[in-house]
Amino acid sequence: MSKKGLIRPSVNTDPIEPAAPVTLDKAEIATVSNEEISETESKKPRTSKKFKNQGSQIKMSDGLKEEFNALKTIRKIKFDYDMLGILIDYYVKDLSPSEKRKFKTLTED
């Protein structure tokens, strides 16, 4: 008994023809050299790529988060990192020249 609303896919009931057998000459069989084996062993499997600028979290109180979201709404900004960049730029603009040099030195790569 089928459930109401489910559509069963049609099943192909045609017989399957076997593929023709493949024959290889000894000259056609590829040999693997030790260099090729060492190259494949040295390659590490690709893992998920972690970006340097992602994965950080900032904990803030509910009130501060509400104010932060209000500023994002006023400025029509979608992402938190954009708003943080604007706030940092605004704060750095008001620093003294010596504090600006310190900030620049600390943030250089």
Image (cartoon, helix red, strand yellow):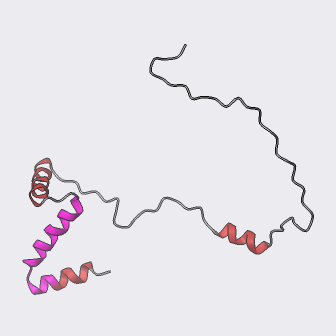
Q: Position of residue 79 (x, y in %)?
A: 23, 58
Question: Foreground residue, 33 or 104?
Answer: 33
Give residue 57's position: percent from left, percent from top: 28, 57
Left/right placement of residue 57 relative to residue 99 reads right
Which image quadrant: the N terminus?
top right
Single out the residue that lies furthest toward the front: 14
Give the farthest residue toward the right. 26
Quadrant in the picture for residue 91: bottom left
Q: Say above or below: 70 vs 100.
A: above
| Residue at x 24%, y 57% (from the top left corner) | 58
Position of 87 with respect to 34 (left or right) is: left
Q: Quadrant of the C terminus?
A: bottom left
Magenta stretch contains residue 35: no
Q: Find residue 97 and report its image quarter.
A: bottom left
Image: magenta residue range: 79-100
Magenta stretch, main secondary structure class: helix
Q: How many marks?
A: 0
Among all residues in the image, which is located at the extreme top? 1
Whether residue 92 is in magenta: the answer is: yes
Instruction: Tell me the residue at 23%/63% (across/down).
Output: 81
Give the residue at x 12% y 86%.
98
Locate residue 22, reporting x and y percent. 87, 53
Judge by depth and name the residue closer to the eye, 47 or 103: 47
Image side of residue 48 versus residue 43, left or right: left
Instruction: Name the residue located 84 percent from the left edge and 68 percent from the top edge.
Output: 31
Front in this rendered view, residue 6 or 75: 6
Q: Can you give x and y, in whole percent of width and height, for residue 47 in the image?
A: 52, 59
Q: In the shown orientation, is residue 97 left or right of residue 9?
A: left
